[in-house]
Image: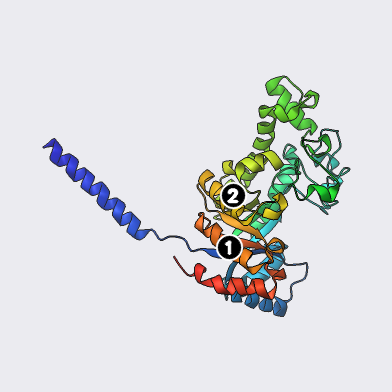
Amino acid sequence: MKKLILIAVLTLLISCNQEKKAVEKPSKFTFSSWTNAGKDFKEEAWIKRLNFYDSLGISELLIGGSPEVLEKIIPLANKKNIKIHGWMWTLNRPGDSVAKTHPEWYAVNRNGKNSLEYRAYVDYYQWLSPFHPEARKHIINNAKKLMKVKGLASVHLDYVRYPDVILGADLQPKYNLVQETEMPEYDYDYHPLARKGFKEIFEKDPIDFKHPELSTEWRQFRLNAVTSLVNEIIDIAHSKDKEVTAAVFPFPEMSRQMVRQAWNDWNLDKAYPMLYQNFYRENINWIGFATKQGVSDVDFPIVSGLYAPALRNPKDLEKAIKIAKENGAKGISIFTADGLSKEQQAVFVKLKKLTSKK
């Protein structure tokens, strides 16, 4: 009798599992692009742009622009079945008039300089500290403004990390740098509140470390500050039935080392790792490796970010798109479709068939 009951239960479980598989539909492979809206909305110009994106098979746009401009673009995009995401610069806030009146909000490097007075690498690197409660509140309020936009596919977070403590190998010569170790002027966040919080737990001040790069606790402490900020934004967004996506560094382990970003600990709806192989002097196959690593590290979808200037050869672009798909990406996002050559555009047109296959 017990055997009969067991067989019946197993049969029921198998049947339910088969029904579930029959109902579930594999997600479609998508083409996306990052782009900027500018300050002024011009309807005719946007109709033309949307027609262009649609001709390439691009069905999602990650747009940097004000909530007011995005609200005007979305109805036009809906006519083309193009989803619009609100692209937000999160911790890096160049030109933020509110933040600039609060220098205490900014991240601090190991030399004691904040990111407003010492701008690592480029002038637009002006990073807020995830340890300062008012800076966090300011960032969350920026995200909330996007959450109010009707029909927005997601709040798309970018620059949600620290300044690069190590630049990609191909970028270092541009700044006359050889970064064989973590240099103090590029090592953030030694904000007084961060140091105080760390000292309360470990009874040590990280500013006194001779080799702070060897302290896994200090690294994790900084990772946690960014992670808690992201997940707080996600919780708020989800409570409003909004999704949150993010542009991130290539794969979690690499992100941890280069920019203190543990995106595999984030509760994202989707991640867009920027797989710009030329920055790291890698080949096209590396895009497949990085995609596969990201897919294996998280349980949310991955869209592989591709850098158009590094894929001028149409064969390279085609290979990059295909290798991302083969390694588990749910789509690719190009930076940026606006600058594609005729030959690159032809690759998108040729591969549009990938976006219609299930």
Please state the horizontal and vertical placement of residue 193, each as a whole percent of the image.
Answer: 76, 31
Structural distance between the alpha carbons of marks 2 and 1: 14 Å
Q: Quarter of the image for the N terminus: give it.
A: top left
Q: Indicate whether 177 appears above or below 320.
A: above
- The three-letter amino acid code for the residue at tag 2 is Ala
Residue shown at 51%/54% (left/top)? 327
Q: In the shown orientation, is residue 106 left or right of residue 319?
A: right
Give the label, 2 or 1, closer to the camera: 1
**Label ID, residue 152:** none
Which residue matches tag 1?
319
Horizontally, residue 69 falls left or right of residue 269, namely right
Dot 1, how many residues are within 10 Å of its Cα: few (below 14), some (14-19), or many (20+)? some
Helix, strand or loop under label 2: helix
Depth check, front residue: 165 or 94? 165
Residue 215, relative to residue 331: is it above or below?
above
Locate residue 342 relative to residue 22 in the image: left or right: right
Horizontal side, residue 137 vs residue 352: left or right: right
In the figure, residue 217 lies in which quadrant?
A: top right
Residue underneath mark 2: 290
Mark 2–mark 1 CB contact (< 8 Å): no
